Amino acid sequence: MTTTNIDILQVKKLSENATIPSKGSPLSAGYDLSSAENTIIKAGGKGIVKTDLSIACPDGTYARIAPRSGLAVKKFIDVGAGVVDADYRGPVGVVLFNFGDEDFVVEKGDRVAQLILEKVSMVGAEEVEELTDTERGAGGFGSTGVKKQRTVSPLPSPANADATIQKFSNVLQVKKLSENATIPTKGSTLSAGYDLSSAENTIIKAGGKGIVKTDLSIACPDGTYARIAPRSGLAVKKFIDVGAGVVDADYRGPVGVVLFNFGDEDFVVEKGDRVAQLILEKVSMVGAEEVEELTDTERGAGGFGSTGVKN
């Protein structure tokens, strides 16, 4: 049965070793997730750290398991996978990648990741012959480089806002670019992401990277962008992560999946294999304004890489 009207993050302890997630400050985006066990993530390796927690997300959200800045900066620790769907009720584990030269020792109670409740659009996907058009069109995937080359278009004035919004649909529009493409689908009603499948046979070499073609182009609903996120099974079993992963709402070119293979074996991809997931993240499109002083907070400048892992 589908549960509705959840307006808080429900948390259940599965053992006495679990720690209820908490925030470092009132406006922190994420809840700290702590280990329920003593374990070691070998140098250059991966592992799942148990939290001994299960959760139920508020309506319209999913739980993103994100890295902690301090562990990334000081220990070269990253988080793999990291999508907990709203209808998942099993134990929450944290997939850690250790890209450092030293083993990473985790003690019970150590903070190893953060849980962020991301707002997500749950609209359906609809195959179309032509996508709604935008000024940008197909330009952009991997083409902008790192140098400043263009001026970002200003936000539309109120007079033009309606015309801009009308370019976007209230569904995820999907266009097949070849007969090898697979229309994205969800594994369950409340899954945050659509499965993205490969349109080709390819190999991602051990320790290498590659772009897997989907032979799809998309048009996101108004107020969203498409986040290309890892699949937990590939992260845990094959040491596969997803790079980049932002498809803007005005991009109409082919969607590719950038895969990093951090494993010791080549990763063989066959046509039709599910290689990533596409999540429609809700995003604020407010403008940026230079100021001389920022509005103050209780936390202030403290926090980037400074809080460590101990409570």
Image (spheres, rainbow, N blue to C red):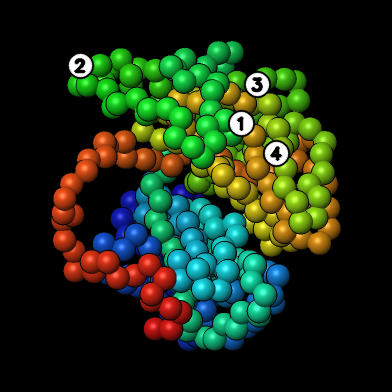
In the image, residue 106 above or below residue 44: below
Element at label 3: strand
Query: Could you say where residue 235 lies in the image, as x and y percent from the top left?
Result: 67, 58
Most foreground residue, 240 or 260: 260
> How many discs mark residues in the rendered view?
4
Residue 211's tag is: 4
Residue indicated by mark 1: 255
Element at label 1: loop
Element at label 4: strand
Element at label 2: helix
Query: Could you say where residue 78 lies in the image, as x and y percent from the top left?
Result: 57, 64
Give the left or right position of residue 73, taking residue 24 as reference: right
Residue indicated by mark 2: 159
* N-term mark: 1 or 2: 2
Residue indicated by mark 3: 176
Q: What's the residue type where badge 1 is placed?
A: Val
Q: Quadrant of residue 145?
A: top right
Give the left or right position of residue 54, taking residue 45 as reference: left
In the image, residue 218 above or below residue 95: above
Q: Quadrant of residue 165?
A: top left
Alpha carbons under labels 1 and 2: distance apart: 32 Å
* N-term mark: 4 or 1: 4
